[in-house]
Image (tube, helix red, strand yellow):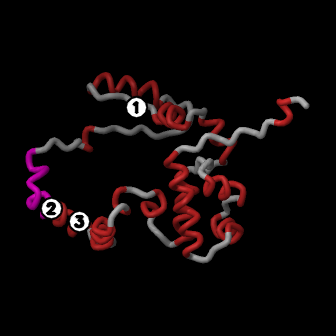
């Protein structure tokens, strides 16, 4: 027999982050007693896409993940597994700060800064030294943005190029694969 016909198809390469994300989605779905079909109906995300996500080969957009987190009634951080979900203390601190006013959060930050002696003299990025240009496609944002960045001495970042670099494909391919939400 021809060995090419006997060979099993290669399994897609699985990134550790996506595998862990898939396990969290599967765990949260099980905890809430949801079937994949039920989750698909609630979120509007196809069962196939959810299956790929749970298997660790689905590269979900942040909006798809937000839809899934909302269906689970949990924070997006719990789904993607940020540092505040790694220990009980982080979870308690996050819960304690959740829903607080901006002034409460500022007071908490100042108290933590005083407690740990960090930040008083530390350099924080000054958000007033950032410029974002928005507008229609082809309006000249990239051209003007580069000129403005050069004049102000700021670094210039074109988000489309950054998205394409991170995704490993073009914006058009992302749109064609995952739709406008991507």
Local secondary structure at mark 1: loop
* Whether residue 169 is situated above or below residue 56 in the rendered picture: above
The stretch of residues the image draws in magenta is 110-121
Looking at the picture, how far across and down is residue 45, in whole percent?
66, 60
- In the picture, measured across the screen, residue 100 lies left or right of residue 111, that is right
Q: Identify the residue shown where x is 21% and y is 67%.
A: 103
Instruction: Identify which residue, 110 or 127, lies in the foreground.
Output: 110
Report how far apart the C-alphas of labels 3 and 1 lie in the structure. 30 Å
Q: Is residue 172 magenta?
A: no
Local secondary structure at mark 2: helix
Which label sits on residue 95? Answer: none
Q: Which residue is mark 2?
A: 112
Looking at the picture, how far across and down is residue 130, in whole percent?
30, 38
Q: Identify the residue shown where x is 77% and y is 40%.
A: 8
* Badge 1: residue crowd in 10 Å (few <14, some 14–19, many ≥20): few
Q: Which residue is mark 3?
A: 105
Report how far apart the C-alphas of labels 3 and 2 lie in the structure. 10 Å
Looking at the picture, how far across and down is residue 29, in whole percent?
58, 70
Looking at the picture, how far across and down is residue 107, in whole percent?
16, 66
* Whether residue 113 is situated above or below residue 6 in the rendered picture: below
Q: Which residue is mark 1?
A: 157
* Whether residue 122 is situated above or below residue 48 in the rendered picture: above
């Amino acid at each position: 027999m021809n060995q090419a016909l006997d060979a099993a198809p290669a399994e897609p390469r699985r990134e550790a982050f996506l595998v862990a994300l898939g396990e969290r989605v599967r765990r949260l779905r099980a905890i809430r007693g949801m079937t994949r079909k039920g989750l698909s109906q609630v979120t509007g995300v196809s069962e196939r896409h959810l299956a790929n996500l749970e298997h660790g080969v689905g590269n979900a957009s942040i909006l798809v993940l937000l839809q899934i987190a909302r269906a689970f009634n949990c924070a997006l951080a719990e789904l993607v597994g940020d540092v505040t979900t790694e220990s009980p203390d982080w979870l308690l601190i996050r819960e304690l700060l959740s829903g607080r006013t901006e002034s409460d959060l500022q007071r908490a930050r100042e108290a933590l800064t005083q407690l740990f002696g960090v930040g008083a003299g530390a350099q924080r990025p000054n958000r007033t030294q950032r410029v974002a240009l928005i507008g229609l496609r082809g309006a000249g944002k990239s051209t003007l943005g580069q000129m403005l960045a050069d004049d102000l001495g700021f670094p210039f970042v074109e988000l489309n190029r950054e998205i394409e670099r991170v995704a490993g494909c073009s914006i058009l391919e992302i749109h064609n694969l995952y739709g406008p939400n991507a």
